[in-house]
Amino acid sequence: MSTPIPDPADPDAHTDDLVEPEGTNAGGLADAPPPPRGRTGTRPAAPTSAVAATPRPDPARSPAPRRSGTSTSSRESPGTIPTGSSAGRPGATGSRAARLGGAPHRRRLGPMSATVRHHVTVSGDPTGRPMVFAHGFGCDQTMWRLVAPEFERDHRVITFDHVGAGRSDPGAYDPDRYSSLDGYADDVVALCRELDLTDVVLVGHSVSAIIGVLAVTRAPDLFASLVMVSPSPRYADDEGYVGGLTEADIDGLLESLDSNYLGWSAQMAPVIAGPDNPVTGAELTASFCRADPAIARRFAEVTFRSDNRSDLAGVGVPTLVLQVADDAIAPPTVGRYVHEQIRGAR
């Protein structure tokens, strides 16, 4: 399947109302302009206070052996997520989960700390305003390694892996819970509550920008603002709406994932990263290849089949939309649509 690349020369594909940062690649993996900061001043850089107090992993290297959990500092005392916590959108059924492909993964029983489940890393100023960075499809928290440290001087920076990505706990994957984006949004809310965060700046890339929309609307007490990097509430074209892909495109993408996941990863990652970013393309390929293929296939279907356009109007916090001009998956017209649908968005 050859994914069509939107024409950046199309005059209708740009808007002066959107922020199109220079130096941000098509995959959103390079530096992005800073969102509104909550605290300023000349406070010196604080030592890392982390749930996983280890150097940020280098995505170009092979992943280290998986740990059974994460260490906690004296400042951090993670709790547990109740066994009866929400399992995503009400009415999700096993039949739909089965349709997403493959047999369900074995799930762990009993309560599990969100910091363990998502391999949470906390750094920066322990007293600063918290910033939570959520990665997109096919990535993990290492995608933020060039961005997140820029905010550590006066923010408490939190990065994490969605279940099924990076060094998250694979035993936590539940096909029913993650049969919609609601399950991922529930995870973000649970993670913030476990870390006792408030006044959060939530930064979401790609599908996590929409996961952020769902999290903000269901827990407005936790979040102060939302930053959406290359968002798309619906990837498929619809009447009066340009999403960037046709239904046939999405069918072909999912069929490619089924038949040759590694081959698809090697082919698509450079397209997403852009022709001028070979290093980023190689890193994205490696990130795709680290993911569990069965979980990645299900996450891809949830990502590309979802339609969350109606959820945008419910965002009630200050929102910044960052749109890349030559994104191969989410064209600028989608960024403009998101900007227009969220009241007061910049």
Image (spheres, rainbow, N blue to C red):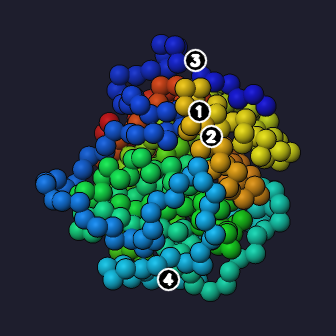
Tell me which amino acid carries mark 4.
Answer: Thr
Furthest toward the bottom, the residue is 110
Q: Where residue 135 sits in the image (x, y, percent)?
A: 52, 52
Q: Which residue is mark 2?
A: 282
Q: Nearer the viewer, residue 309 or 25?
A: 25
CA separation, marks 2 and 4? Answer: 36 Å
Q: Is residue 40 left or right of residue 170?
A: left
| Labels 3 and 1: the sequence-earlier one | 3
Q: Which residue is mark 4?
A: 80
Instruction: Please rate how many residues cluster around mark 1, counting C-alpha atoms within 10 Å: few if below 14, some from 14 to 19, many from 20.
Output: some
Q: Is residue 37 left or right of residue 164?
A: left
Q: Which residue is mark 1?
A: 278
Q: In the figure, residue 122 lies in which quadrant?
A: bottom left
Q: Residue drawn 83% across and 66% down?
A: 103
CA separation, marks 2 and 3? Answer: 24 Å
Assign a secondary structure to mark 3: loop
| Labels 3 and 4: the sequence-earlier one | 3
Question: Could you say which disc has been placed on residue 7 in the image?
Answer: 3
CA separation, marks 3 and 4? Answer: 47 Å
Residue 251, can we see it?
no
Residue 14's place in the image compared with 87, above or below, is above
CA separation, marks 1 and 2? Answer: 6 Å
| Labels 2 and 4: the sequence-earlier one | 4
Labels 1 and 2 touching (C-beta < 8 A): yes
